[in-house]
Amino acid sequence: MIWLVGCRGMLGKEFAAAFDKAGIAYTGTGSETDVTDKKAVISFVSGKNFTYIINCSAYTAVDKAESEENRAMLINCDGVFNLAMAAKQTDAVLIHFSTDYVFDGEASEPYKETDATNPVSAYGRTKLAGEKALIDIADRYFIFRISWLYGRFGGNFVSTMIRLMNERDSLGVVDDQKGSPTYTKCLAENIIRLMNSGSNKYGIYHCSDEGVISWYDFAAAIYRMGKEKGIIRKNVELRRITTDQYPTPAKRPAMSAFNKDKIKGLDGFKLNRWEDNLSDYFENYGEK
Ligand SMILES: NC(=O)c1ccc[n+]([C@@H]2O[C@H](COP(=O)([O-])OP(=O)(O)OC[C@H]3O[C@@H](n4cnc5c(N)ncnc54)[C@H](OP(=O)(O)O)[C@@H]3O)[C@@H](O)[C@H]2O)c1
């Protein structure tokens, strides 16, 4: 049996859908089983026989975290610590997700798992603290650092672009932050193959779709594919802007692409080009 924590978030729903489709048994919980409540977490696993705990719960409001760092820390660090304790108690492998925002974005080469971290936002600090808490406690774990997550469930950059492109005549998109999208469907499929393999190559992995782009490049492809599919119905002028022209409370890394050599050796993992995954998103648009 699998415990899917945070089953109603963007990634959690993708796992739930993939498990339902594959006939994989799981128990899903949301914030009613509060990960920050140690007693509740430990008592939840008591007497149950989980092989994997997949943690899709998190505090993900990057800008809001600047003014709510304690709350974000509670969920992204203390909550992860509690799940690591629970995994140990039930002898489960813990699968957890972290972020490219643990890096400062000053590198000129894609980041390796062994590169020094230096978060420049409150969210990044809380996610890094969560990684460290997990590693201190758990023996059998996979941490996947992912970036620019999007998919059919929940609000994300792609769904926001589609909405704005159907409302506006002109749209400025940041062109001086480079990174890689991660498509939830591809990620969930990879992790199911990993679990099926029973791999014990535990550790931290960098994971995203293949290819390095700017937010502007991503928006331009969304516009092109959305128009082709009739999902974007307006003509929109897309403009390249700089980070300075789009101020946000949280600072974001300018270059957060990952070196993915390590994950390419992990059982079951197959990474697709970002364009192919975006095309799949549009092919299946509206399917829940
Ligand atoms: N979104 C991105 O661009 C991005 C980028 C890089 C990494 N990540 C990481 O990827 C993972 C999945 O992100 P996501 O975007 O799918 O997240 P999401 O849509 O924001 O969902 C997070 C879920 O966490 C649950 N949750 C929040 N506080 C909780 C608590 N105290 N106890 C139990 N559950 C709680 C919420 O449950 P309820 O719905 O029941 O309230 C929510 O459904 C996270 O670890 C995130 O840090 C995301």
Image: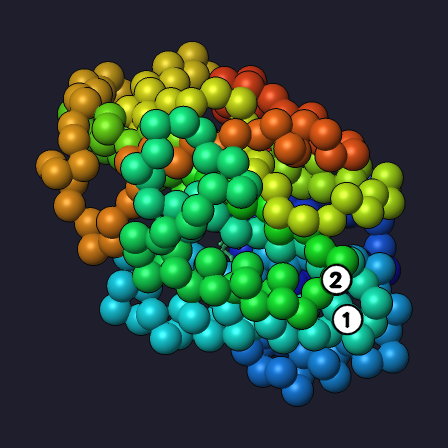
Q: What residue type is labelled 1?
A: Lys
Residue 176 shows in this picture: yes
Q: Which of marks 1 and 2 is nearer the N terminus?
A: 1
> Could you tell me residue 264's position as x and y percent?
67, 28
Q: In this view, does 223 lie above or below 118?
A: above
Q: What element carries label 1?
A: helix
> Could you tell me residue 14's position as x and y percent?
63, 45
Task: Point out the frontmost of discs 1 and 2.
Answer: 2
Residue 266 located left or right of residue 216: right
Closer to the camera in the image, 194 or 29: 194
Residue 261 located left or right of residue 180: right
Residue 183 located left or right of residue 244: right
Residue at the spot 75% in from the left edge and 62% down from the top edge: 139
- Tell me if label 1 and label 2 are in contact, CB under 8 Å: yes
The quadrant in which residue 287 appears is top right
Q: Name the residue under label 2.
A: 139
Q: Which circle marks residue 88 in the picture? A: 1
Q: What element carries label 2?
A: loop
The quadrant in which residue 166 appears is top left
For label 2, being within 8 Å of ligand 1 is answered no
- Give the CA distance from mark 1 to mark 2: 8 Å
Residue at the spot 82% in from the left edge and 47% down from the top edge: 200
Residue at the spot 76% in from the left edge and 58% down from the top edge: 140
Q: Which amino acid does label 2 sit on?
A: Asp
At label 2, counting other C-alpha atoms closer than 10 Å, the crowd grade (few under 14, some 14-19, many 20 or more) is: some
Residue at the spot 67% in from the left edge and 78% down from the top edge: 41
Q: Which circle marks residue 161 in the picture? A: none
Closer to the camera in the image, 41 or 133: 133
Q: Quadrant where the N terminus lies? A: bottom right
For label 1, being within 8 Å of ligand 1 is answered no
